[in-house]
Structures are given as C-alpha cells and as structure tokens.
Image: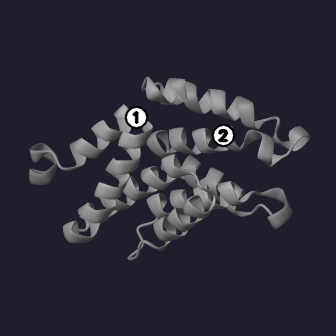
Amino acid sequence: MLLRGEGDFKGALAAATRSVQARHELGVGSVKGGLVEQLEAAMVLDGAKAEELLSDLERLRPGETTPYLMAQAARFRARLSAGEDDRGFRTALAAFRVLAMPFWEAVTLLEQSEWLFARAEDAAALPRMVEAQEIFERLHAQPWLERLARLTSPESVSA
C-alpha cells in the first residue's frame, strides 16, 4: 500500500504478488489485503493483468472467498467494464455498508462519482461526492479528500 501511495506501482504490484503467494497455504482470507493491492496496482499498469487477476478472484467458490472480497470484486469489475450502468458500484457499496466498512464505502462512492462525471451525469454524481467527502473527513483521509477535490476542479471540469 505504501509503495502504491508513493507512486511506485511496479513495486506495489511485485510486493502484493509476493504477499498473495501464501494464499494456497493460508487461505484467501489471510491475503485479502494483498489481493486488493495487487488489483489496484494492476489497474494502473496493465489492464489485461487487472482483468486476469479479477477473473481469478471472481472464480473463487463461495467457501473460498469472503463478503469483503466479493464487494471488492464488484468494485473492480465496475471500474474495468465499460458498462452502461453502475450496478457493480451499487453492489459493492451495499456490501461495504453491510460490512460496516466506511472507508471502502467512501472509495466506492468516489469511484462511482468519477464514473458518473465521465458520462456527464453530474446531478447523480454530486450527492455521492458529498457522502464520500463526509466519510473521508470523518476518517481524516486527506489523500482521498484531495482526489475528491480534483474531481470538481476547474481543470477537470473543462477537460
């Protein structure tokens, strides 16, 4: 996570891949953070690799996965797909709410807002942004508040 935060996506992918290698001995629940980090880095570096990793995650049988990983899979599928609806974001958001994971709720709301803005659906994006901002402020998640601010900056709006 630290490497990705510093912008070293190749290093982050390599570190996450190493952490995930214990999956077969320890079970997927023991390496779920590594799986998410692996996908996050792959999303930046290599869409085909991200698709491969996500497909592997989606193929896990019910006893091999966790509700958290299923929610993450829905979130990543929404980001990867060029779908006409935001079903994946809605699925992930509902799951993170049930799991009482406010940080991931806010991340999903932000990503859904980005998706909606890209489709010129600003009116639908704004309430999600407000909710994400409230959560990030409560969590003191400054980098995420900055990302949220960039979404509505004059440069991004005119782009």
Query: What is the quadrant of residue 138 in the picture?
Result: top left
* Foreground residue among 23 and 136: 136
With 125 as the anchor, is 98 left or right in this view? right
Element under disc 2: helix
Residue sitting at 52 percent across and 59 percent down?
A: 75
Residue sitting at 27 percent across and 70 percent down?
A: 124
Asked if the residue under mark 1 is in contact with the one under mark 2, i.e. CB atoms within 8 Å, the reply is: no
Query: What is the quadrant of residue 51 in the picture?
Result: bottom right
Residue with the mark numbered 1: 140
With 15 as the anchor, is 144 left or right in this view? left
Sequence-wise, the earlier of marks 2 and 1 is 2
Residue with the mark numbered 2: 33
Closer to the eye: label 2 or 1: 1
Whole-number angstrom distance, CA of label 2 to CA of label 1: 21 Å
Residue 57 visible in this rendered orientation of the protein: yes
Residue 135 pos. (x, y %): 40, 48
Above/below status of 124 relative to 65: below
Give the amino acid at mark 2: Gly
Residue sitting at 57 percent across and 45 percent down?
A: 39
Assign the N terminus to one quadrant of the image: top right
Residue 27 pos. (x, y %): 85, 45
* Foreground residue among 143 and 26: 143
